[in-house]
Image (tube, rainbow, N blue to C red):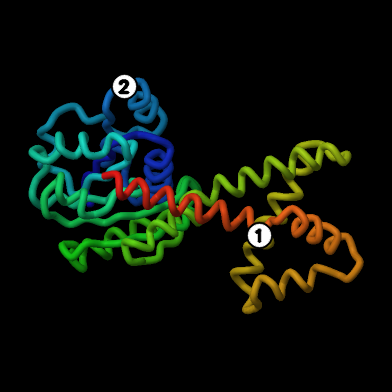
Amino acid sequence: MKKILFIGAGSMAEALMQGWIKQQVFKPHQIYITNRSDNERLQCLHDKYGVSILQDDETFAQLDSIILAMKPKDAVAAMQLLHAKLADHTAVLSILAGIPIDTIIENLGNRPVARVMPNTSATIGMSASGIAFNEAVSDEQRTIFLQLLEAVGSVIEVKEDQLHAVTALSGSGPAYIYYLMEAFERVGTEVGLDKDTVRLLMTQTLAGTAEMLKQSPEEPNELRKKVTSPGGTTEAGIKALEHYHFNDAIEACIKGAEARSRELAKSK
């Protein structure tokens, strides 16, 4: 792709453009950005990464792809304004939570559309993404879209309906982990360690645990049992998690996020 345009300039858009520039997928001047009204935000991204601010409608004819990255509540109105400006060959990559491909086609016309749910770890090339395509996406375009996501992490092709679950798990997942880290830091300082020490210990613990899960053929429950000695400290911690219904909280978290994604889809 020679030119792409982000419609919307929020944190996920920034994570992708930063990741693509860092991985040399695009040169900064090949990435265009625009949003509804926040010119200060656009200027900030231009100054930070060297990306191009969209100046006129003539650029639309030169675009290989647009990336829908606006707030979901603004999506339909934005697409209706975009429809007449887009060339017939321009493909669409949507990172909008809950907005189905049918809604995109209804407002932008029948064209190649891919829906992806990445996460903000794309910034450092560590995103976990799920992607779904419509039938208008060619094999070449499919390969390009997959390569774009692989450049900033891992990507798995799924059915569109499964993107609700992807959104709830990996799309929102970083926030759950950050929330967990907040708790570790708070409690860690209460039991006598300074915040920097807690962060060092727990970030390495999380990284090491993730790597063990990637490399080991064993299931998580088997790995957990190997760490949990009868009558030991780990068992005491696990019992506390069970007492406070840890599994129920995780289930409510994921199912709540998945249900909200479906609500957003139905409202469009």
The answer to whether residue 62 is left or right of residue 265 is left
Q: Percent from the top left, x then y, of residue 13? A: 37, 40
**Farthest bottom residue in view:** 217
Q: Nearer the viewer, residue 239 or 31?
A: 239
Q: In this view, does 95 lie to the left or right of 1?
A: right
Mark 1 burial class by Cα count in 10 Å: few <14, some 14-19, many 20+:
few
Residue 179 at x, y percent in the picture: 63, 43
Q: In this view, does 48 lie above or below 83?
A: above
Mark 1 vs mark 2, foreground winner is 1
Amino acid found under the numbered disc labelled 2 = Asn
Quadrant where the C terminus sits is top left
Q: Is residue 193 above or below residue 150?
A: above
Q: Are marks 1 and 2 in contact (CB under 8 Å)?
A: no
| Position above or below: 57 against 156 | above
| Residue at disc 1, secondary structure | helix
Identify the image quadrant of residue 59: top left
Q: Residue at x 39, y 25 (%)?
A: 44
Q: Which mark is residue 247?
A: 1
Q: In this view, does 61 lie to the left or right of 176?
A: left
Gap between marks 1 and 2 measured at Cα: 44 Å
Nearer to me, 208 or 71: 71
Q: Position of residue 42 (x, y in %)?
A: 33, 27
Give the SS element for disc 2.
helix
Which residue shows up at 88% across the image and 60% down it?
233
N-terminal of the pair, mark 1 or mark 2, is 2
Residue in front for this viewpoint, 226 or 43: 226
Amino acid under disc 1: Asn
Circle count: 2
* Residue ID for mark 2: 39
